[in-house]
Amino acid sequence: MRALFDFHGMGAMVYKEARHILREPTTLALIIAMPLMQLLIYGYAINMRVEHITTVYYSEDSGRLSDQFITALQGSGAFDIVGRVESPESLRQAIVAGTAHVGFDIPQNFSADILRHKPAPVQVLVDGSQSTIAEAAAAAAAQIGTSMALSLNSRAIKFQPIDVRPMILFNPSLRSPNFLVPGLIGLVLQNITMVLMALSVVAERARGTLDQVLVTPIGTTALLLGKIIPYTIVGFLDFGLVLVMMTTIFQVPIAGNLFVLLVLGAGFLMTSLGLGLLISTYAQSQIQALLMSAFLVIPSALLSGMFFQVQLMPPIMRVVAYTLPLTYFLEVLRGIIVRGATITELWLPAIATILFGLAALGLASLRFARTSA
């Protein structure tokens, strides 16, 4: 029986383990790069302050004070005016499509009512599918209205000439599950299918069973489809399960078309499976496969817009965000589930989701065929 406090040979064991680590430069590089990547994302990319909210406006007033109000919005730093629409319906449509998070509706007699010391209402439509943005936008709009009123009228404390009226769309009570759960569905779907596919192929290679299959008459395409189809079924079952949980447990209804959601979910499944297969062609062990997966999981969780608005990130991080498939699938999920958007309004993220899937599967297939030859 070995003595508990026997330190004999400890130096030799330290030397052996150090050599084992150094003999796997890929794992060593991943271990070193992982904390650096996390520090960059947490410290540089995440901005808790909500600003530069994409905004559109509709104005029936041609007076000087309506222009002054729009200028005050743009100059506040809270809102980025990205366009002017031609009707109240277009104002709402821009928010449903996700091209704007806030819309201001300025009435026809806005300037005249202020000059006559009458209340001038401004309707503010706010996207409630982004709960953090919605709260900040409503507060910022009210503050800008008060500040402008004070600058126009010294009696504004008693008489408020600008009446800002926020209306939260899609999620009036600003329930957190309505914002978080659709995003979590995309992340869970990506992680499960990607990691399962990567670990499955790497494990087969380690056991030698993959080499045995490769020497059989089965073709490369048949082999790939045989690997992908079962995990596609698993992914769809998981997708259906989390959608049921979302609607029953978290009480988040699906406002849009379920069939369109499932079709685009299939496109995202192709992306996740392709990424898992691609990882498996580079990873030499399951540890390496998990670490490589983490390089996609962490940025996807923090940079895709699931918790933090992409527009709030520094420019370089926004570029990274728009290279992540989950960024586009989150637009699809929140658009269909929360805002009730149609494929016409979500055509850009829908096309991006499908193209990512085709590209990931195509690149992974080429790489797999090359490494298995």
Image (tube, rainbow, N blue to C red):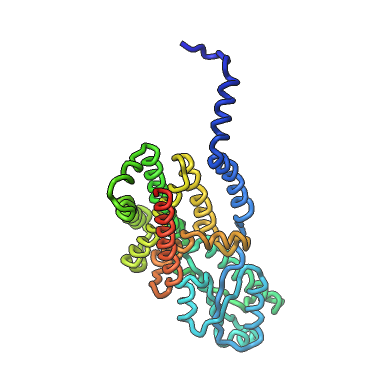
Residue 154 or residue 323, whichever sits in front: 323
**Residue 2 point in image, percent of width and height:** 49, 12
Residue 307 visible in the shown view:
yes
Q: Residue at 62% across / 59% down in the picture?
A: 49
**Residue 187 point in image, percent of width and height:** 44, 54
Vertical position of residue 188 compared to residue 17: above or below: below
Q: Residue at 59% across / 84% down in the picture?
A: 110
Vertical position of residue 272 compared to residue 16: above or below: below
Lateral position of residue 27 relative to residue 355, left or right: right
**Quadrant of residue 31 in the image?**
top right
**Residue 127 point in image, percent of width and height:** 49, 68
Q: Residue at 58% across / 19% down in the picture?
A: 10
Vertical position of residue 185 compared to residue 199: above or below: below
Q: Residue at 56% across / 73% down in the picture?
A: 55
**Residue 346 point in image, percent of width and height:** 43, 71
Lateral position of residue 306 relative to residue 317, left or right: left
Vertical position of residue 282 compared to residue 6: above or below: below
Number of on-image labels: 0
**Quadrant of residue 244 in the image?**
bottom left
Lateral position of residue 218 relative to residue 77, left or right: left
Give the residue at the far left of this rendering: 217
Residue 230 or residue 82, whichever sits in front: 230
Residue 185 visible in the shown view:
no
